[in-house]
């Protein structure tokens, strides 16, 4: 499974290299990481960050706390042994509530010896779920421990082997598990002591054992900075995994055939997303032939341009002319397009609310506010609840003029940012419709359509029609939670005087157009009996599934085989 994953990722990386080289030419300017998901910019407070980290730890069942029994007392991560401790039969161990998942790649925790107690008979290590907890770790099968009284390591046996120094009060002992090599190591006060155990089984639990009265330890699972710098080891494993993939040898036999397959994957990817000029240049240099008719590609390209520029109404009309009946057969897609059209009306991008057909950068909300104030000089606008003053300036989302070949920019890629979710290509139809040239006017003012009353009324009337359409869909096809949320999010924009700075303002980001653009692109391709997704995206999905299966089967390399990072050029 690992070899297969490496081969797929190596192929994907070569395709990525080709695409980036193409993007550096005159055909596709400014295309950097074409396979990466849209960047997520998180502005989190300390409390939000803590909540996020906690959610991740709980979701992926990372061991972060001991599961205590009556043999121990615990307070805020501190563990103490209250027993008599006369013989080894009085020993007891405690382990975490969850085992170490393979997806960690490298797991590490530290234990501070607060007090060695009477004799310092303490063990720190790992154990499987069925191991007897009335013994120190390492004494039983599938149990591994490093003991403080003699410095020996115990590997599933009551007989220890010399390993490291003894440890006592004030020392900090770390235990790390390398899930790539299935080995374990220890540290003392920040110093690496070397590998203690090899050929470890999966699903082990961090374990601490105590035996004599007064023994007290504090466990640190990452809630505090570690004494040992584990970051260097993580980077080393990450680089090692990456180099294995990058340097994976190409097939000795059929080298030309394998290279042709990669060229084909790159070419179909370009055609799928409408980068026609780039696809033509690449195809001519590699001897590729298009499966889709040239005019069909141009037609899809026109629709893509319209959607990415925010002119959704025109995109719907163009789709109905070029592909009759397509949207009628997919009412959910039509509803998604119209919800996006409403958002673009609020954003001031859709031609339905633009003066002279040119979108600008101010919101319908500002126009509505100006209109209501003109109708009510006293400023009482309780009915529409838009009395709030505007705080800040809306972001300037300007697409500029779109050339014949759609630009693959980092900030605006045709559904390319998410390989798994982008749509596929072609429709074999010809049309004499001229290429669309979209121009967006910059405006530093906060008035949509100059406070055009007619544009405001169009937006409100369109909202009524959209709501009626949602009711009709619900009556005919039943409830659809996705459509319901989509409509609620769109209508929620009307509740804010400055929608860009509102909790639902993310909808006004031009990148949000890519989702509905991908859906429509896929529907067009499917209507022409073409694949909804290009082979390159299918291969990327396959690689992600292989990584998931590696994690499920305990292969630790999956922790460093992040697909988006590996194929990044």
Image (cartoon, grey):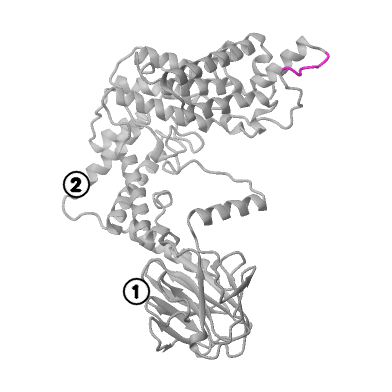
Residue drawn at x 61%, y 69% as measured from the top left: 77
Instruction: Answer above or below: position of 549 versus 476.
Output: below
Residue drawn at x 46%, y 26% as measured from the top left: 479
**Residue at which label 1 appears:** 199
Q: Which disc number belongs to residue 256? A: 2
**Label 2: element kind:** helix
Task: Give the image location of residue 209, x and y in percent.
Answer: 52, 79
The image quadrant of residue 453 is top right
Image quarter (top left, top right, bottom left or bottom right) of the N terminus: bottom left
Judge whether residue 425 can be spotted in this image.
yes
Which residue occupies the foreground of this view, 255 or 56?
A: 56
Which residue occupies the foreground of this view, 5 or 28?
A: 5
- The mark lying in front, picked from 2 and 1, is 1
Instruction: Answer above or below: position of 536 versus 217.
Output: above
Instruction: Tell me the magenta residue range.
Output: 378-383
Task: Give the image location of residue 469, x and y in percent.
Answer: 49, 16
Dot 2, how many residues are within 10 Å of its Cα: few (below 14), some (14-19), or many (20+)?
few
**Label 1: element kind:** loop
Judge whether residue 354 can be spotted in this image.
no
The image quadrant of residue 188 is bottom right
* Residues at circles 2 and 1 in contact by the CB criterion of under 8 Å: no
Which residue occupies the foreground of this view, 4 or 166?
A: 166
Q: Which disc number belongs to residue 242? A: none
Instruction: Answer above or below: position of 429 versus 536.
Output: above
Residue reaching furthest to the front: 70
- Check if residue 8 falls in the magenta segment: no
Q: Earlier in the sequence, mark 2 or mark 1?
A: 1
Task: Give the image location of residue 481, x and y in percent.
Answer: 49, 30
């Amino acid at each position: 499974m690992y070899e297969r994953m490496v081969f797929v990722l190596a192929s994907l990386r070569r395709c990525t290299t080709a695409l980036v080289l193409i993007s550096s030419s005159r055909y596709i300017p400014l295309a950097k990481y074409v396979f990466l998901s849209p960047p997520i910019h998180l502005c989190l407070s300390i409390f939000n960050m803590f909540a996020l980290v906690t959610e991740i730890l709980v979701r992926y069942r990372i061991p972060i706390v001991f599961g205590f029994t009556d043999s121990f007392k615990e307070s805020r991560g501190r563990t103490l042994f209250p027993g008599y401790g006369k013989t080894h039969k009085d020993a007891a161990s405690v382990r975490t509530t969850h085992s170490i998942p393979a997806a960690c790649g490298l797991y590490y925790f530290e234990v501070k010896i607060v007090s060695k107690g009477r004799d310092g008979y303490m063990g720190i290590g790992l154990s499987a779920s069925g191991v007897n907890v009335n013994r120190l770790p390492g004494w039983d099968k599938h149990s591994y421990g490093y003991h403080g009284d003699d410095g020996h390591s115990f590997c599933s046996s009551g007989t220890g082997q010399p390993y490291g120094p003894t440890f006592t009060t004030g020392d900090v002992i770390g235990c790390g598990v390398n899930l790539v090599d299935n080995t374990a190591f220890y540290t003392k006060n920040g110093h690496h002591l070397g590998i203690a155990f090899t050929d470890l089984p999966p699903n082990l639990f961090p374990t601490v054992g105590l035996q004599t009265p007064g023994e007290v330890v504090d466990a640190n699972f990452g809630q505090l900075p570690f004494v040992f710098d584990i970051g260097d080891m993580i980077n080393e494993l990450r680089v090692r995994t990456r180099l294995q993939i990058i340097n994976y040898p190409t097939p000795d036999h059929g080298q030309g055939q394998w290279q042709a397959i990669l060229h084909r994957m790159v070419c179909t990817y370009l055609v799928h997303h409408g980068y026609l000029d780039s696809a033509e240049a690449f195809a001519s240099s590699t001897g590729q032939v298009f499966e889709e008719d040239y005019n069909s590609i141009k037609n899809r390209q026109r629709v893509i341009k319209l959607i990415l520029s925010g002119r959704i109404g025109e995109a719907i009309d163009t789709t109905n002319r070029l592909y009759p009946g397509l949207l009628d057969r997919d009412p959910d897609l039509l509803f998604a397009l119209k919800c996006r059209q409403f958002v673009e009306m609020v954003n001031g991008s859709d031609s339905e609310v633009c003066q002279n057909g040119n979108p600008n950068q101010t919101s319908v909300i500002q126009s509505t506010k100006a209109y209501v104030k003109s109708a009510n000089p006293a400023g009482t606008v309780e009915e529409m609840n838009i009395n709030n003053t505007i705080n800040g300036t809306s972001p300037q989302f300007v697409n500029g003029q779109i050339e014949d070949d759609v630009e693959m920019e980092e900030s605006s890629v045709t559904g390319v940012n998410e390989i798994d979710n982008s749509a596929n290509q072609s429709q074999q139809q010809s049309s004499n419709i001229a290429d669309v040239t979209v121009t967006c006017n910059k405006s530093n003012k906060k008035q949509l359509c100059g406070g055009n009353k007619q544009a405001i009324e169009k937006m409100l009337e369109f909202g009524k029609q959209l709501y009626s359409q949602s009711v009709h869909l619900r009556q005919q096809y039943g409830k659809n939670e996705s459509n319901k949320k989509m409509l609620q999010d769109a209508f929620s924009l009307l509740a804010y005087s400055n929608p860009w700075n509102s909790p639902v303002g993310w909808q006004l980001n031009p990148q949000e157009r890519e989702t509905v653009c991908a859906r429509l692109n896929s529907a067009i391709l499917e209507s022409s009996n073409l694949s909804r997704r290009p082979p390159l995206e299918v291969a990327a999905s396959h690689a992600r599934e292989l990584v998931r299966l590696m994690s499920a089967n305990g292969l630790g390399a999956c922790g460093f085989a992040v697909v988006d990072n590996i194929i990044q050029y």
